Amino acid sequence: MKKEWNFNTRTVHAGEDPCPQTGALRVPIYQSSTFVFDSAEQGGRRFAGEEPGYIYTRLGNPTQTALEEKMANLEGTDSAIALGSGMAAVSSTVMGLLEAGDHIIASKTLYGCTFSLFSELLPKWNIEVSFVEMSDLNNIKAAIKDNTKVIYTETPSNPTMNLVDLAELSDIAGEDIITVVDNTFMSPCLQKPAEFGIDIIIHSATKFIGGHGDTIAGIICGPEDLLNSFRETTVKDFGGIIAPFDTFLLLRGLKTLSVRMERITKNAKKVAEFLSNHPAVDTVYYPGLKDHPQYELGEKQMKGPGGVMAFELKGGIEEGKKLLNSLDLCILAVSLGDVDTLIQHPASMTHYVVPEEDRRSAGITDGLIRLSVGIEDVNDIIDDLEQGLNKIK
Ligand SMILES: *Cc1c(COP(=O)(O)O)cnc(C)c1O
C-alpha cells in the first residue's frame, strides 16, 4: 500500500494485501480462536512479546489486524484497535487512561451510554467527572484541575448538533492532558481529529464505518504507546473483542465509505433545506445549514456536514407520534449512519420512560425528531417526510 494515495483510494486498499499463499484478493475471515506454535520455545517467545505472531483471538487475529491497519491509515494515527462495540471502545479507552483520584472533563452532551458510564460508573471507581458545555471553550479552561488527565468530547453532538473546536481543544489540553474525541457522526471521511492534534479518536463502527446496519462494533485510533497500554490491560482483560466475521463486515463496509458519505451528505443537505421550509417544522439542527450558529467552524474542521440532523416540530408528543406513524420509507429505529434513512422521536421512543424534567434538561423536547439520512433517492425521502408532515401542519 502506497501511503501517498488519496483518501478515497485508501478506503479501498489500505490494510489489505492479497493472501500470499492462495492469492485470495479479500482478507480471509480467520475464524479461529487459537493459533498453533512450532515449538514450546516459540510459544514462550510469543507470550514474552519477543516474536511477533498470533496467540489467541482475544489478543489479536489476522482479519482484525487488516481492519486496524485500515482504520489507523484513514484516521491518520499510528495505530488502531477494533472492538466488539462502540461502548467497548469508550470503556476500554477511559478505563485504560484513568485511575482512582484522576479527573476527566467531558462534554455535557454525550451519547446516552457514554453519559451513564461517566456519570454513574466512573465515580464508583473514585474517578472525578466534570460535565461542561464545550461549545464555549472557556468552560473547559475553567474546569481544568491539577488531577485532570483526560478531556472527552463528541462533535457534532446530539441533539442540537453543536460543534467543538478541535484545534482549540487540543491547544487547551496541551501536552499533559489527553484528548479523546468520539468521531462517530462524521467518520474519517468528513473529519480527522488527529489533524487538529487530538490524541485518541473513537468510533461506534456500528454506524458509518460498517454502514449497513448489520454489525455492532467499535474502534479506537491513536498513538502506539497509549493503544499498546490498552491492549495489555483493558482490551485483553475486559475482553470486549470483535468477532472475525464482524471484522470482515467492517472491512467490506469501509470500501464504500466515501461513496456512501458523498451521497448521504448530498441527500441530507437537501432534506435539511426541505425541513427548514416546511410549516410544521420549527427549527432544524444541522451543521450544513448557513444559519447553524457554528457553520463557519464546521467549514473549517469538517469536509462536509454528514447525514445526521435533528428537528423541532411546532407540535409536541402527539404530532411527533403522528408523523412517525405516517411514514412509509423512513424507518422507525435508533442507530444512525446506515444506508437506510432512520428516524426516531425521543420523547415517545428512547426517552419515553425518562421523567419530563430530566428529558428537558438533556435537550430532548416533546417535538424533537432525529433523522439519519440514508442513500435512497432523495426525492423519495422528501416525499415521505412531506406527506407525514402535511398531516400535522
Ligand atoms: C452508537 C454510539 C455509541 C455506542 O456505540 P455502540 O456500537 O452502540 O456500542 C457511542 N457514541 C456515539 C456517538 C454513538 O452514536
Image (cartoon, rainbow, N blue to C red):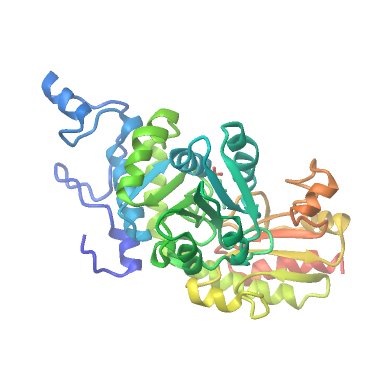
Q: How many numbered circles are shown?
A: 0
What residue is drawn where x is 33% and y is 52%?
A: 223
Placement of 37 over or under 192, stated as above or below = above
User: Which percent across, then down, holds residue 113?
Assistant: 62, 42
What residue is drawn where x is 80% and y is 57%?
A: 365
The quadrant the C terminus occupies is bottom right
| Lateral position of residue 247 relative to residue 338, left or right | left
The image quadrant of residue 199 is: bottom left
User: Which percent across, then down, holds residue 7?
Assistant: 34, 67
The quadrant the N terminus occupies is bottom left
What residue is drawn where x is 48% and y is 51%?
A: 203
Residue 338 visible here: no
| Lateral position of residue 83 relative to residue 368, left or right | left
Placement of 27 over or under 54, stated as above or below = below
Placement of 201 over or under 289, stated as above or below = above
| Lateral position of residue 353 relative to residue 214, left or right | right
Residue 241 visible here: yes
User: Which percent across, then down, holds residue 268?
Assistant: 60, 70
Residue extending farthest to the top is: 40
Q: Nearer the viewer, residue 25 or 65?
A: 65
User: Which percent across, then down, holds residue 272?
Assistant: 67, 72
